[in-house]
Image (cartoon, coloured by chain):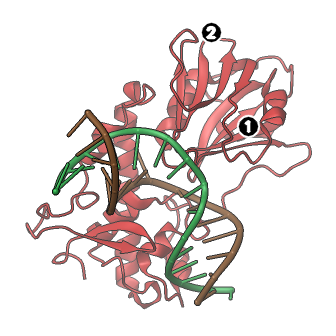
Chain colours: A red, B green, C brown
Amino acid sequence: METVASGVNRRVRGQRIEGVWFGSHREPFRTPASRQARELEGRVLLSVHRTGKHIVCELSAKGAPIPHRSQKMDMQSEAGEAAAQWIVHLGMTGRLVVTDPENPVATHTHARLSLSGGKELRFVDPRRFGCLELRDLQREEPFQAAGAEPLTIGSGGFAALFRGRRVAIKAALLNQSLLTGVGNIYADESLFRAGIRPRRASGRLSAAELERLREALQKVLRHAIQLGGSSVSDYVDADGVKGFFQLEHCVYRRTGEPCRVCKTPIRRILVVGRGTHYCPHCQH
DNA sequence: CATTTCACCTGGTGGC
DNA sequence: TGCCACCAGGTGAAAT
């Protein structure tokens, strides 16, 4: 998400939305497509950033001039100026693509925004688990994630999230109202690096284990963001993202393959219905 | 209340 | 080649 948001931001910020097309396929829109189309047109994309797993596009008032911006201008001041937000959740298979308008339109393209810079921003989502929402900030609150931000949370706050809970630690990590933005890959990878089995009751982890988990989670997320940052150029073209994460995976989707540390075959189980991968020797 | 299961969709893969 | 079961980066409603 971080990679997608920063890449899209780089390509579309400061451009006006001149035309909007929504497909007849019904994505689970929080805002009716007709209202989104009406509201988006004529606004300037001030900035695009990530909050948890959501991509938030800050929008100007309709017909507002394109702002002249200095390099130093930070996100806070931009967010403050915004009159509306377009909030994109990519679900499992959603993609945001910036492309030339004449390029063929992929199947399952649900939205196309034509931009003043001559490109088109497209939302493509085969499984339709994604979600699009428009907020008018004159009337509604700006988007805010329910859970804590995993990259910056401290030891005390992190430990408090799991106190008294009986759920498996893996389930707690995936619970977006506790932590925002942790998905299946990072849950498995951080539990491996912390040496903790995914089915352990979250409330029974020791303070030392929780601190190991917090550090592992932050390390994994930062590392992944860094790798994403280094392969920015191709991610927007459909498949650019696919290749690079796999190289770093210790357990995710490595069922039966030898553990990178101890050579024990990686095991796959189900936890709250999600495929879960761990090393039976390294994780306790 | 906390927790688990299931439905929502399409597409890719591997076995027979 | 076809058919089928199973798997997939997520989440929210319904059931327990």
In terms of secondary structure, where does tag 2 sit?
loop
Residue under pointer 1: A77
Return the residue found at the far right: A139
Q: Position of residue A111 (x, y in %)?
A: 65, 29
Residue A142 in percent (x, y) is at 78, 49
Q: Is residue A91 above or below residue A3?
A: below
Q: Mark 1 belongs to which amino acid?
A: Ser
Residue B6 in which image quadrant: bottom right
Dot 1: chain letter? A
The residues tagged by marks 2 and 1 sit, at their Cα atoms, a distance apart of 27 Å
Q: Label 2 belongs to which residue?
A: A118
Q: Say which quadrant the C terminus of chain A sits in.
A: bottom left
Residue closer to the observer: C15 or A208: C15
Q: Which mark is residue A239?
A: none
Q: Please tell me how crowded label 1 is: few (under 14), some (14-19), or many (20+) other residues with Cα within 10 Å.
A: few
Residue A102 or residue A82, whichever sits in front: A102
Camera sees residue A19: yes
Quadrant position of residue C2: top left
Is A217 left, or right, of A120 in this rendering?
left
On the same chain, marks 2 and 1? The answer is yes
The subunit carrying tag 2 is A
